[in-house]
Image (spheres, helix red, strand yellow):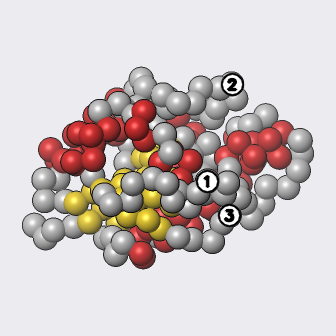
Amino acid sequence: MMHTKIGLFGGTFDPPHNAHLMIAQEALTVLNLDEIWFIPVYSPPHKTREYMAHPDERLQMTQKAIADNPQFQVSTMELERKGPSYTLETVDSLKEAYPQTSFYFIIGGDMAEQLHLWKDIEKLKELVTFAVIDRPGYSIQPIDLKEMKYINMPQVDISSSMIRERHRLGKNIRYYIPDSVWAFIKEKNIYG
């Protein structure tokens, strides 16, 4: 088996939006990866709230969002595991299943500032290379970048929470999210 480089991109994807796709594409290009695996989490340890789309809806939206890019895949492993998602468990399973693969874990600058709080972060750093993406409002300069890759990209200040809020207020969300996701949200009336 050839040695592959895979970017892991976890998130609630509630809904997946165009900034997610731009981040994934930028990581793919800058780090010269073979694929990006989107990993929708079942219930994120850091976020719980009302009005979350059902995990199966988030999976379907993510699949629709990436359908036209053959280098983007969706992994359902965290959805299948259920319960809170801990990155180390996910990465351990992946390393076991794909021992020849190098994994790059994609995070925003906002998460990078919190990395020292993550469960088993030192063990995690041995298993993956963190790829940190600029996020609006977060400077990632103070973080120790020796063991991380840094991806500079144009700032797109779109968040899933902002999209849900705009939708709730009856404002336009077209072009913030892929058309296929927009159609699905309307068809299923996902965010009320």
Is residue 154 left or right of 62 when viewed as pictured? Answer: right
Q: Earlier in the sequence, mark 3 or mark 2?
A: 2
Circle count = 3
Q: Which residue is at the far right? A: 170
Is residue 25 left or right of 156 when viewed as pictured? Answer: left
Q: Earlier in the sequence, mark 1 or mark 2?
A: 2
Tell me the SS state at disc 3.
loop
Q: Earlier in the sequence, mark 3 or mark 1?
A: 1
Q: Quadrant of the C terminus?
A: top right
Q: Which mark is residue 50?
A: 2
The residue positioned 48% from the left and 64% from the top of the image is: 24
Q: Quadrant of the N terminus?
A: bottom left
Question: Which quadrant holds residue 22?
Answer: bottom right
Tell me the SS state at disc 1.
loop
Residue 132: give x, y in percent of width and height: 45, 58
Taking the image as drawn, is residue 57 in sight? yes
Residue 122: give x, y in percent of width and height: 27, 40
Q: Are marks 1 and 2 in contact (CB under 8 Å)?
A: no
The amino acid type found where label 2 is placed reads Glu
Tell me the SS state at disc 2.
loop
The residue pinned by badge 3 equals 156
The amino acid type found where label 3 is placed reads Val
Q: CA distance from mark 3 to mark 1?
A: 13 Å
Badge 1 density bin: few <14, some 14–19, many ≥20, Cα 10 Å? some
The amino acid type found where label 1 is placed reads Tyr
Vertical placement of residue 70 versus 171, above or below = below
Q: Are marks 3 and 2 in contact (CB under 8 Å)?
A: no
Q: Nearer the viewer, residue 164 or 106?
A: 106
The residue positioned 50% from the left and 45% from the top of the image is: 113
The residue pinned by badge 1 equals 138
